Amino acid sequence: MRLDDFDFHLPAELIAQVPARERSASRLLRLDGVTGTISDRRFRDIVELVAPGDVMVFNDTRVIKARLTGRKKTGGRIEVLIERVLAGDRAFAQVRASHAPREGSVLVLADAVEATVLGRQGEFFLLRFDDCDDVHQLLDHHGAVPLPPYIERAARAQDEKRYQTVYAREPGAVAAPTAGLHFDESLLEALRDRGAVTAWLTLHVGAGTFQPVRVQELARHEMHSEWYRIPQETVDAVERARAAGGRVIAVGTTSLRALETAATDGKLAAGYAETKLFIMPGYGFRLVDRLLTNFHLPRSTLLMLVSAFGGMDNIRRAYRHAVAERYRFFSYGDAMLIERA
């Protein structure tokens, strides 16, 4: 398959720049991947669209304040986006500068912190933060919320809360698992009252999620690596639901990728690992029956994933419908509920 197969026209004004006033007040486009039927709903309708005994798997990663601005000690403005925090005082990061920093360069960040460039691995720089034994704490004090590049404004105070799910627990993501942004506590409670089972996993979303696909032949594309963990309690919940005829609903593409990676033989396994799973049309899904997700960028691996799940023609029609009906796109936008094709 080719990259051009996943292009579409999106009017710029449909890219949501701010969140909805209430989390659960978004719109929901429902797509049946078997029949191709499309219907327009409100996000709160998710309660009646989930059956008792279904298991909904959420990603409880927590977005860190991963963006830092500053300068090289020798001069020159820079912007640092932490990709992954390592043990102690080190982290991998993207560094934007007029000239890429060399090994041994010192970066002065937020007029308060110094970091030394220890080396480079691909597009990421290995940084050592001076006088620091907890990078997470440093970012809490000096970092900013890493809003996606298509949100064309600086992060505001409200983003610290709204670009974060209400159930976020495990710090490490540099992008939000955006399907989860629509849930508030009352909606989660309503789902449990309905008889749905809520289960949890952790996948730390990396900055690579926003990197463009740079090859036309998709077989040549290599996915970025992301760390995930699936607890035994989630495995048990999934197995009980499947045994009783319930459906497995992945809340977000991150949950789906973790579940599919950990179900290599169709049986979910607990544990932690890295995933570089690239899902595009032709992929044979092993575990997930339904996917709740936001709308995705043209020519992106996430659009390829939903096309594999819902069917390419179905997704194309659904996206044309969403544009015509003025749905809001991307992280702060509206959502889709897709029945697997």
Image (cartoon, helix red, strand yellow):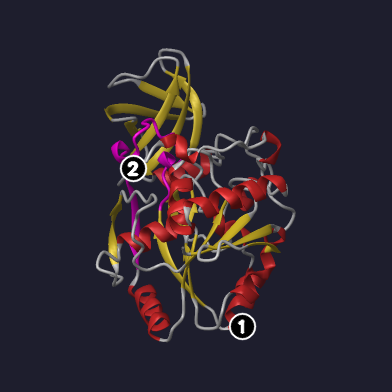
In this picture, which residue range is highlighted in magenta?
204-230
Q: Nearer the viewer, residue 254 or 91?
A: 254
- x, y percent for residue 261: 31, 59
Question: Dot 1 corresponds to which residue?
Answer: 193
- x, y percent for residue 56: 49, 71
**Left/right of residue 226 with respect to residue 67 in the rendered view:** left
Residue 289 shows up from this direction: yes
**Disc 1 crowd, CA 10 A, few/some/many (<14, 14-19, 20+):** few
**Left/right of residue 267 with respect to residue 335 in the rendered view:** left
Q: Nearer the viewer, residue 337 or 130?
A: 337
Give the residue furthest to the bottom.
244
Residue 214 among magenta residues: yes
Q: Earlier in the sequence, mark 2 or mark 1?
A: 1
Q: Amino acid at mark 2?
A: Met
Question: Dot 2 corresponds to which residue?
Answer: 223
Q: Amino acid at mark 1?
A: Asp
